[in-house]
Image: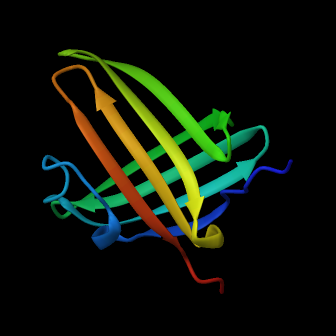
Amino acid sequence: MRKPDFSGEWILNVEACALSPAVAPAVQNGSARIDHREPTVSVHLHFTMNGEPVDVRFERPSNWTGDALEFTDTVPTPNGDLTISFRYELRDSGRRLRAAEQLRGAGREQDNVWVFDRAAST
C-alpha cells in the first residue's frame, strides 16, 4: 500500500496548535518545507519566536508507523540528554500537517502539537 507523501510548503496555523506553556507565548508564526523522497525525508522548519528567527533542518530515513512518519533524536545538553520525538501525520485529505512533538529529559518535559496548513500552489 502506498504511503502518504509529505512533500510541500506548509504554513503554521498558530491558532490550531496545542503548545506547552513554555512555547505558546513565544510563537508568532512559522513554516515548513518538506522534501519527502523515499526512503528519506528532509525537513526545514522556520519559526519566529519572541521576534527572533529560529531555523531547524534535518534529514532522516523515513520511519513509518501506519501512515505516520516518526523521528526520535537524543541530544546531549549541559543538563543531561534531551530526547525529542516527532510524529508527522497528514489530515484533511493532505491539506493539513499535524506534528506531535514530545521533549523529555534535561529538565524539559514538554508536549506540543504543531499544525501546518498546505501553502497554496503558485
Where does residue 22 sit, x and y in percent of width and height?
A: 14, 46
Q: Is residue 7 left or right of residue 19?
A: right
Compared to residue 94, the image places residue 60 above or below, namely: above
The colour scheme applied to this rendered structure is: rainbow
Which residue is at the front of the view, 121 or 116? 116
Q: Is residue 64 left or right of residue 86?
A: right
Quadrant in which the C terminus is drawn: bottom right
Q: Residue at x 62, y 34 (%)?
A: 60
Compared to residue 10, the image places residue 119 above or below, namely: below
Q: Residue at x 19, y 51 (%)?
A: 23
Q: Residue farthest to the bottom?
A: 122
Q: Residue at x 28, y 72 (%)?
A: 15
Compared to residue 35, the image places residue 68 above or below, namely: above
Q: Is residue 112 left or right of residue 39?
A: left
Where does residue 104 sit, x and y in percent of width and height?
A: 28, 25
Where does residue 65 sit, x and y in percent of width and height?
A: 64, 36
Q: Residue at x 60, y 38 (%)?
A: 59
Q: Residue farthest to the top?
A: 80
Where does residue 27 sit, x and y in percent of width and height?
A: 23, 61
